[in-house]
Image (cartoon, rainbow, N blue to C red):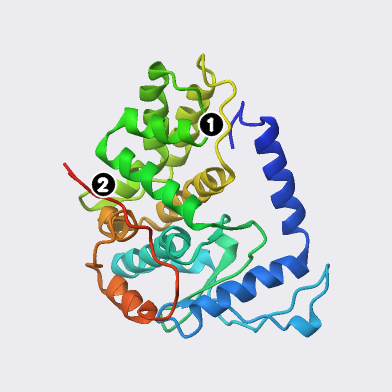
Amino acid sequence: MAPGIDTGAIADEIRERIAEELDYELEASNQRAMARVYRDHPFVVVPDVAMALCRERVIVMDFVDGRRFAEVRDLPAADRDRLGEILCRFYINGPMRHRLLNGDPHPGNALYLDDGRVAFLDFGFFKRLGDREVEHLVRSNVATYRGDADGLLDLIVELGALPPDPQLAQPFYESYHAIFGWLMVDEHTTADPSTTAEMMRRYTQMRGQEGFDELVLPAEHFVMMRSVMLLIGLLGQLGATNRWLDISREWMFGDEPVTELGRQEAAFFAGRHDYTTPAVDAGSRA
């Protein structure tokens, strides 16, 4: 992702994820879990896996007939905006709800069906989250949304990723906001692919500052950061526009959805799954 990130713990995490991505039996298990969650979903398709035909080097799934990413980049703006919201809901909102984090938003990992649904493929770079891990992700993003640099540092210190040095609060907040801040913009904003370069620049700049040489973020933060960076690149290529905070509020504050896709998804998941976003005291949103 950036120079300086290859600390021992992060290197171990990368090594583990790569080893898992090359194990198709494990990937088939990941895909089956995701397919169960999204079976009959109104706008997300995850193909079922033919487990009897899968091996370590072979994965077989249901055939999906859809267009590739390059074929939808020139659709009318309203269609691209809708697809952008689907991508955001699958890669960001999804793991906060069902605890299954796909860390590889890639142009080749989705097919766009003629009926408006999106089929998602490739579940190798994958992490299963616990309730506590999701809670920390939510709390860190809520602190970022509030501009609470000290509160964000307290959370990262609680995770053992940084020492309790107040001088680290602002630079860490600025780097974290550079990555996640676009999800918190309370106005219609068109995604910009150049944002990815700025994310990496700010993170690299932080890593070079005194006090951050031993920063080791938990695996779920690392995988989520990677997912967010790749996702903003996809949305930027689509030129997708949205009030992204409207979508993020659902997992940051437990708000009711305000978009049509959000209402469809909420109706689908109602009563279907045990996992819900941990309760977080939203407090002031100013």
Callout 1 secondary element: loop
**Along the horizontal axis of the image, is 77 left or right of 171?**
left
Residue at mark 1 to residue at mark 2: CA–CA distance: 27 Å
Which image quadrant for residue 94?
bottom left
Please provide percent x and percent y for residue 191: 35, 50
Please provide percent x and percent y for residue 208: 54, 18
Select label 1 or label 2 by which is in front.
1
Callout 2 secondary element: loop
Residue 17 can be seen, yes or no:
yes
CA neighbours of label 2 inside 10 A, class few (<14), some (14 to 19), many (20+): some
| Residue denoted by label 2 | 185
Which one is earlier in the sequence, the residue at label 1 or at label 2?
1
Q: Return the residue nearer the eye: 124 or 10.
A: 10
Q: Is residue 16 above or below residue 279?
A: above
Q: Return the residue nearer the eye: 1 or 159.
A: 159
Name the residue: 41% across, 78% down.
Answer: 43
Query: Which mark, by number, is residue 55?
Result: none
Q: Return the residue nearer the eye: 232 or 147.
A: 147
Name the residue: 63% across, 82% down.
Answer: 48
What type is the residue that disc 2 sits on?
A: Val
| Residue denoted by label 1 | 161
What type is the residue that disc 1 sits on?
A: Ala
Q: Is residue 98 above or below residue 116?
A: above
**Along the horizontal axis of the image, is 251 left or right of 15?**
left
